[in-house]
Image (spheres, rainbow, N blue to C red):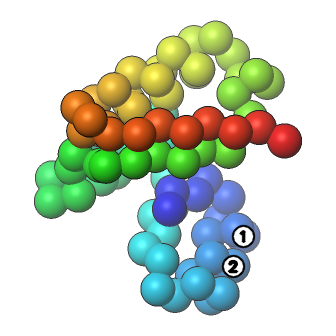
Amino acid sequence: AIESSIEFFKHMRQEFPEVKTILGQAEHLSKILSPTQLPVAAIVSSLPLRILSLETQNNIMREIDKVLAPAGYYIQYTY
């Protein structure tokens, strides 16, 4: 899991220690994931993309393209 909020990052680490949680931004996926973690088989995202600037949305999508395996899955949901 990648989390940008320090509070939620700490919560995730405490409540779900079996889940590897990384503090960082989706705009920097290719930099915060180590080469041994690439490519990723799936990305499940709940980012509020619609409220982000178009530039930020495009940056995130470029990063997803960089790290996702060719036959990988990308699931985006919004609530």
Secondary element under disc 1, as helix, strand or loop, is: helix
10 Å neighbourhood of mark 1: few (<14), some, or many (≥20)? few
Left or right of 30? Residue 10 is right
Residue 73: which quarter of the image?
A: top left
Q: Residue 54: x, y in percent?
A: 64, 11
Q: Residue furthest right?
A: 79
Q: Which quarter of the figure has residue 12?
A: bottom right
Disc 2 residue type (three-letter): His
Q: Is residue 26 visible?
A: yes
> Element under label 2?
helix
Q: Which residue is mark 2?
A: 11
- Image marks 1 and 2: residues in contact by CB distance under 8 Å: yes
- Please identify the residue farthest to the top as the structure is shown: 54
Reply above or below: 59 against 72: above
Q: Is residue 31 visible?
A: no
Q: Residue at x 39, y 32 (%)?
A: 64
- Please give left or right for residue 15 compared with residue 18 in the image: right
Q: Residues within 10 Å of mark 2 (few under 14, many from 20)?
A: few
Q: Is residue 70 above or below residue 25?
A: above
Q: Amino acid at mark 1?
A: Glu
Q: Which residue is mark 1?
A: 7
The vertical placement of 45 against 59, above or below, is below
Q: What x and y, as percent, mark residue 56?
A: 58, 21
